[in-house]
C-alpha cells in the first residue's frame, strides 16, 4: 500500500478499480520476482534509483527518466529508505502495468505514471477510510481521533456462540486497569463481552466491580477470585495465582502517563507473566487483536492449542537455563560442605 502524502494533481482518465492489488500481492511478487532479481545487480535485496530506473524501463517498454523514477519512488518507496524492496516493486509494477494496459494508447508515458500514482493514492485512501469506519466503535479504546463514522459499514465482531470448553475447564483470565484506563477497560469489555464471558474472570477490586456491573443479570458468567486493588496488594495476589497455576492469561491496561505507589508490584506482575509464559497483553490494541484468537480457540470443537497457557503450566525458555545454573550452584555448595 502506498503513502497518502505528496499530492498529485493529475487524475486517471479511466479509473482502475480501487483496491485492485488487494489479495493479490503474493501473485504479483511471484510474477515480478525474476525481473526484480535481474536488476538487483548487487544482490542486496533492494533496488536503488538506478536499478529501479532500468527495471521500470524494461517493465514498461519506455525510456524512464531520473525525474520520473524519483516521482515513482516518492509514492511506492513506502518505508522512505530511498530504495525499492520486492514487496514495493510488486505493488509499483502492478499499478503501472494496469495503467499501461488500461489507458488510451495516445496517452503519453509521463501521464501514465502520474495516473498510476493517483490511483495508488486513491486505493490507499479507500482502504484507510474502510478500516477507519470499521474501527469507529472502538475509537475510544484505540485513541483513534481520525475514525470515520459510516452507518453502512458497521460490523459486529462479538456475536455470541457456544464455546467448546466451559470456564471451569480453563484457568482464569485476569483483567486489570489503572485509574485513567478504567473507562477504556469498560468500553473494551462491553465490546467483547460475549468472548470474555467464556472465561472465568478475575482481577483487581475496581475492575471486578465493573465486570459485575457489565454482566449484571447474566447468570452464565463465572467469576474467579476478586483481588485487592493494586496498591493494596492486588497485583501480588495475581502473581500468586500465576505461580500456583491458577491464571492462564492477563489483559492489563496500565497508565503510562502516571507514577504508581505500587510500581514494584506492577513490575513483578509483568515479570512473572514472562517467567510463567502466560498469555499477556498490555495495550488496548493488542487486546483487541487477541480477541480473534480467543474466539477461534473456543469455536466449534475448539482449538486449545491456540491458548495453551489456559490448559498447561508453561515457563519461559530462559527458566530452563536458570534451573540448570541453579543446580550447579547448589552442587558447588554441597561439594564445599562435604
Image: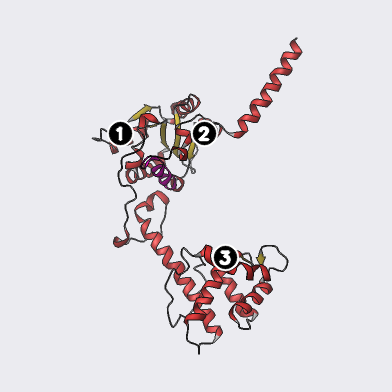
Residue 234 image offset from top left, x and y in percent: 44, 28
Against 121, is 68 above or below? below
Magenta range is 288-302
**Disc on the earlier residue, 1 or 3:** 3
Residue 294 among those drawn in magenta: yes
Q: Are marks 1 and 2 in contact (CB under 8 Å)?
A: no
Numbered mark located on residue 273 in the image: 2
Task: Count every numbered label the image shows and give the total.
Answer: 3
User: Which residue is under mark 1?
Assistant: 221
How far apart, in angstroms, are the residues tagged by discs 1 and 2?
Answer: 25 Å
- Kindly report which numbered mark, 1 or 3, lies closer to the viewer in this rendering: 3
Residue 203 image offset from top left, x and y in percent: 40, 32
Q: Do the residues labelled 3 and 2 touch (CB within 8 Å)?
A: no
How far apart, in angstroms, are the residues tagged by discs 3 and 2?
Answer: 41 Å
Residue at x 65%, y 76% (from the top left corner): 53
Residue at x 25%, y 35% (from the top left corner): 218
Against 319, is 58 above or below? below
Residue at x 45%, y 36% (from the top left corner): 250
> Which residue extends farthest left?
217
Residue 35 image offset from top left, x and y in percent: 63, 71
> Which residue extends farthest bottom?
106
Amino acid at each position: 500500500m502506498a503513502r497518502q502524502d505528496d499530492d498529485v494533481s493529475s487524475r486517471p482518465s479511466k479509473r482502475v478499480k480501487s483496491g485492485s492489488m488487494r489479495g493479490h500481492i503474493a501473485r504479483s511478487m511471484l510474477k515480478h520476482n525474476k525481473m526484480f532479481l535481474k536488476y538487483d545487480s548487487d544482490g542486496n535485496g533492494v533496488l536503488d534509483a538506478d536499478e529501479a530506473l532500468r527495471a521500470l524501463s524494461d517493465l514498461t517498454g519506455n525510456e524512464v527518466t531520473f525525474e520520473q523514477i524519483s516521482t515513482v519512488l516518492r509514492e511506492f518507496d513506502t518505508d522512505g529508505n530511498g530504495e525499492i524492496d520486492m514487496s514495493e516493486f510488486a505493488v509499483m509494477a502492478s499499478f503501472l502495468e494496469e495503467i499501461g494496459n488500461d489507458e488510451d494508447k495516445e496517452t503519453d508515458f509521463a501521464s501514465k505514471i502520474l495516473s498510476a500514482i493517483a490511483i495508488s493514492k486513491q486505493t490507499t485512501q479507500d482502504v484507510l477510510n474502510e478500516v477507519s469506519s470499521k474501527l469507529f466503535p472502538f475509537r475510544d479504546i484505540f485513541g483513534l481521533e481520525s475514525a470515520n463514522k459510516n452507518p453502512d459499514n458497521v460490523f459486529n465482531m462479538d456475536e455470541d456462540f457456544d464455546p467448546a470448553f466451559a470456564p471451569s475447564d480453563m484457568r482464569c483470565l485476569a483483567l486489570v486497569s489503572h485509574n485513567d484506563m478504567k473507562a477504556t477497560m469498560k468500553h473494551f469489555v462491553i465490546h467483547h463481552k460475549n468472548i470474555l464471558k467464556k472465561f472465568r474472570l478475575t482481577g483487581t477490586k475496581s475492575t471486578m466491580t465493573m465486570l459485575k456491573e457489565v454482566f449484571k443479570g447474566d447468570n452464565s458468567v463465572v467469576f474467579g477470585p476478586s483481588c485487592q486493588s493494586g496498591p493494596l496488594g492486588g497485583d501480588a495476589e495475581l502473581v500468586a495465582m500465576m505461580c500456583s497455576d491458577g491464571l492462564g492469561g492477563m489483559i492489563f491496561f496500565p497508565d503510562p502517563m502516571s507514577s504508581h505507589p505500587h510500581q514494584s508490584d506492577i513490575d513483578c506482575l509483568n515479570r512473572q507473566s514472562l517467567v510463567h509464559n502466560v498469555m499477556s497483553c498490555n495495550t488496548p490494541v493488542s487486546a483487541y487483536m487477541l480477541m480473534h484468537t480467543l474466539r477461534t480457540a473456543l469455536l466449534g470443537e475448539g482449538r486449545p492449542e491456540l491458548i495453551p497457557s489456559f490448559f498447561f503450566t508453561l515457563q519461559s525458555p530462559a527458566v530452563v537455563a536458570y534451573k540448570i545454573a541453579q543446580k550447579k550452584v547448589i552442587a558447588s555448595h554441597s561439594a564445599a560442605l562435604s
